[in-house]
Image (cartoon, rainbow, N blue to C red):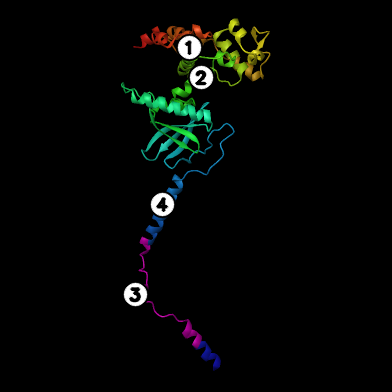
Amino acid sequence: MVGLEIAQVMENRTKKRPRSAWDITPAQPQAKRAEVVSSTSNEVISRRRQASPPRRDDDREGHYVFNLGENLTPRYKILSKMGEGTFGRVLECWDRQTREYVAIKVVRSIRKYRNAAMIEVDVLQHLAKNDKGDSHCVQIRSWFDYRNHICIVFEKLGPSLFDFLKRNKYCPFPVDLVREFGRQLLESVACLGWSYPCDLWSVGCILVELCSGEALFQTHENLEHLAMMERVFGPLPEHMIRRADKGAEKYFRRGLRLNWPEGAVSRESIRAVNKLNRLKDLVSQHVESSRFSLTDLLNGLLMYEPSERLTARQALNHPFFNNLT
């Protein structure tokens, strides 16, 4: 009996009093609860998709490291790499705000390139402001500093140009091109110093690339670079070789002749040089009716001796451009 009484007492103690109506959370319909859960989940997924990627160290050259499909800031989704140059990389991105494709140049996280990028921004903004002809050859939309990388956003490119740039992995922005192709001249490789005529050499290289779809000299090795120049333009002038400083003496034999192919780093390097054509033959492969005037223009822009190169005004007045109008 005692055990039964204890059991009854414990049962009475564990019973809870009924909750008042005001103390009860109204029951939600099943469909409504599912809607709330789904909405919350979608919001979380959306935030995750637009979140910035985890911080990573830049590569050893100061380039921004990324994965395709992740975000470059919550606004821009990275779709592909369009190209890479001395200053940085150009990424094809989706602009979530305007729902457009854009090209974003992500400059290397190195002070001299960051400073040069800010100059580039000023130049491009000035060009856009004074584009009275509405040609829109270069359209800068905005720029921002992201994780110590200057990022320059360019307007949506037309389908044909966009496809060309992607196909040829080409960085399409003039200020960068001038500096990038400025490396591809004798003054630089042979340590002769440079001045304004180097810009005309750069323009000549750009015209060849626009003509052929490929960079004129695809190399970063100095001796191979000089050998490629001789292959395309003929022997280097002796008077320029004599003026080269001591840092360039290793590229020449007895101070008068290029140390090629003896100094080549590999057989592949020799083959890369040998497959190049003379300038007139290179142009003839891609141009028909205007090949003679274009070749003459390029010969003027790509003279070894800076003082003998065409000036910008002379180039603009060349018959090749007159025939285009």
Q: CA distance from mark 3 to mark 2?
A: 80 Å
Label whose residue precedes the other's in the sequence (1 or 4): 4
Binning the other alpha carbons within 10 Å of mark 2 as few (below 14), some (14 to 19) or many (20 upward) gives many
In terms of secondary structure, where does tag 2 sit? helix
- Indicate which label's residue lies in the foreground, 1 or 3: 3
* Residue 21 tag number: 3
Q: Read off the magenta span.
A: 9-32
The residue type indicated by label 4 comes to Glu
Instruction: State which quarter of the image contains the N terminus.
Output: bottom right
Q: Residue at x 57, y 7 (%)?
A: 234
Vertical relation: 98 (above or below) 301: below
Q: Amino acid at mark 2?
A: Phe
Query: How far apart in space, not on screen, are marks 1 and 4 (Cα)?
Result: 56 Å
Judged by depth in the image, the label closer to the viewer, 1 or 4, is 4
Up/down of 30 relative to 140, above or below: below
Q: Is residue 240 visible?
A: yes
Percent from the top left, x then y, of residue 72? 46, 39
Residues tagged 4 and 3 counted as in contact (Cβ below 8 A):
no
* Closer-to-camera residue (247/269): 247
Judging by the rendered image, the residue that carries numbered circle 2 is 181
Q: Which residue is mark 4?
A: 43
Residue bearing mark 1: 283
